[in-house]
Image (cartoon, rainbow, N blue to C red):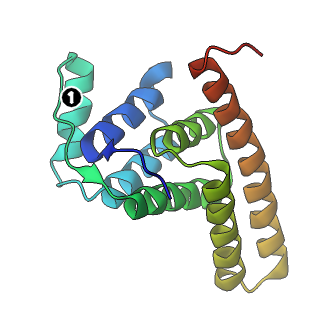
Amino acid sequence: MSAEQVHRLAAFRSTIEVMLLDGILTREEKRLIIRLSSCLDLEPHQPAEIYQAIINGVETEDGDILSAEEQHEVYKTVFEVAIINASLSKDEFRVMAHLREILAIDDKEHDLVEQELRDMVKERFEDPNMVEKTLNTLRDSVRVVTTLFDNVRKKNNGETR
């Protein structure tokens, strides 16, 4: 489990900032925002206020600290929404890599999340073709997110590719 101190509102804000790097919020990113705000237990007005603060260049409160368990659940739940969507874009991969970094999800915990999602997919879908398709999407997603995460980690540590 993560030992990093992650603030609820700061995590939401930084994730929205990552989504806005290209200047637009896609329908898929909006879906992730809705799930993220729910996972973070934000008040109904907070997502819009934070979004407006980003647009206006105004600082916002950091919010309270997420427990390690909450960090794990946030990552897993948003990852689930992303893979069930099954049409992951480069933007969504970037968001997942960002969440993995700020929530301090190491390789071991990431593997645990991946296994939890595999088990969930097998339970949820009876059709073997759907299970296989979703697991393949998950496998591909894990590979891309891991690559992006490793690139971010190298950049933050001053390494070059």
Q: Does residue 145 lie above or below 3 as drawn?
A: above
What residue would you read off at disc 1? 52
Q: Residue at x 50, y 59 (%)?
A: 1
Pick the front one: 104 or 39: 104
Please give the name of the residue rendered at 53% of the width and 60% of the height, measured from the top-left corner.
76
Q: Quadrant of residue 48?
A: top left
Left or right: 32 as drawn, with respect to 100: left
Along the viewing direction, whichever of 42 and 29 lies nearer the viewer: 42
Please give left or right for residue 37 compared with residue 101 in the image.
Answer: left
- In the shown orientation, is residue 50 left or right of residue 113? left
Could you tell whether 49 is left or right of 1 in the image?
A: left
**Point 32% across, 59% down: residue:** 38
Q: Position of residue 3 (x, y in %)?
A: 43, 50
Front one among 83 and 71 = 71
Image coords of residue 152 (percent x, y) = 61, 26
Query: In which quadrant will I find the C terminus?
Result: top right
Residue at the farthest front position: 3
64 or 43, nearer to the observer = 64
At 64% from the left and 68% from the top, the residue drawn is 117
Q: Secondary structure at mark 1?
A: helix
